[in-house]
Amino acid sequence: MTLTPHLIRVRTIALILAISGYLLSFFHRVAPAAIASDLAATFHIGAASLGVLAATYFYVYTVMQIPTGVLADTLGPRMLLTLGGLVAGTGSLLFGLASNFEMAICGRTFVGLGVSVVFIAMLKLIAVWFEESRFATLTGVAMFLGNSGSVIAGAPLAWAAQAAGWRSVFVVVGVLSLLIGVVSWFFVKDSPLIASGQSQPRNDSVKSTSWTAGLLTVLRNPVTWPGFFFNFGIAGTFFSFAGLWAVPYLTQSVGYSRVVASNHVSVYFIGFAIGSILIGRISDRIGRRKPLLLGGAVLYCMSWLVWILVENLTPMITYPMFALMGLVTSCFTLSWACAKEVNPPTLSGMATSVVNAGMFLGAAIAQPLVGWVMDRYWDGTLSNGVRIYARSDYKAGLLLLFGLSAAGLLIGFFIKETYCRNQWGESVEIKSN
């Protein structure tokens, strides 16, 4: 349907609120990296426990991905953004006020639960309100804007943690999440028809009586799954490193200050944000998905070898490498478009949520596993009650991340080329195009 100026305003407001919630979800995703030493000292924990605390976000996020896809296609984005903001805000307040490790875990769990619905709700809004040919481009723009949350969770968070304390930061973020949730209830509309006061036709949405059949359709589709495992290896290791281990690695292994190390995380996500907005636009322009997806994955896997093999790391090397890794890792964002384009259009929420779950499952497993590997090699060195790990300890963890990313790359060759159009109803076979 043709959108009137009123509907365009409604669409813009809804997308701004969704992106705002997504910004905060990215902040929570990578914030532990900048305050890792603070968390370790506050709760008296080692690398493995620190990994569990950070990964709790990803545990909940992973479990919620498929239910979120179902809810996006049944309840709609408005309800998800409202409830998500309220739950995430409560969790952030709880985390910021935590008096012990268990309370911090509880707060982090609520944060993960609340923000887990935001991204799929945002994709659903884009799928419903915009033309299919603009999906990858608009997803990239939303990723670019949302990634500012990751940039804020780098150097600015490190500075704020030193100036006002990390607890105050999470209390403020919690209040902002609550506000986004409340405002979303009044201003987000699930579709142009609803916004214009019309009822949604039965064949334009997935009804509660048929969502199980829809989910089974997505799960039984063989070309849905390569994107899931690709994200497990590529995106999972990306967020495992950027979301927790990058700052400790640069401070303890390379010798940078916490602010300088956090600057690298900001650069990492600036590169990722730029890559996200470019790769979707280029993909839509050339009408292909796989060349960009696989090319980025190859460069990403090769990047790990620098951290593993190069001994004398300097800012002249580390800053460009973090920017490059962020830039090329954006290739995984095309997996959402691929998943949407090999499944029924009305199941776009479920399709994108399934492949998205791979990313968070990968991070949920990799973050504590890296910590466990490092604890196995730790020689017992402590500084102010915080464990200090040698470069060899970190290299063992980085080798694990390299192996997982290489496995994701190999599986990427089985992702179906969709040529930027929905192919449901056509032959969908697993083959390399």
Image (cartoon, rainbow, N blue to C red):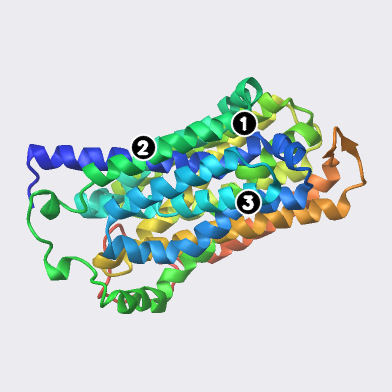
Quadrant placement of the C terminus: bottom left
Residue 318, how many percent across, how many down?
Answer: 67, 31
Amino acid type, mark 2: Leu
**Residue drawn at point x = 27 percent, y = 46 percent:** 185
- Which residue bears the numbered disc 3? 105
Q: Secondary structure at mark 2?
A: helix
Category of crowding for the residue at label 3, using alpha-carbon neighbours closer than 10 angstroms: few (below 14), some (14–19), many (at least 20): many
Q: Are marks 3 and 2 in contact (CB under 8 Å)?
A: no
**Residue 432, picture quadrant:** bottom left
**Marking on residue 179:** 2
Residue 136, how many percent across, how many down?
Answer: 33, 49
**Residue drawn at point x = 27 percent, y = 50 percent:** 126
- Which residue bears the numbered disc 1? 166
In the picture provided, is 13 more to the left or to the right than 335? left
Q: Secondary structure at mark 3?
A: helix
**Dot placed on the residue nearer the N-terminal end, 2 or 1:** 1
**Residue drawn at point x = 24 percent, y = 52 percent:** 133
Q: Secondary structure at mark 1?
A: helix
Distance CA(mark 2)–CA(mark 1): 21 Å
Amino acid type, mark 1: Trp
Amino acid type, mark 3: Ile
419, above or below 278, in the image: below
Residue 44, how many percent across, how many down?
Answer: 79, 43
In the picture provided, is 34 more to the left or to the right than 420? right
Q: Are marks 2 and 1 in contact (CB under 8 Å)?
A: no
**Dot placed on the residue nearer the N-terminal end, 3 or 2:** 3
292, above or below 182, in the image: below
Q: Is residue 233 visible?
A: no
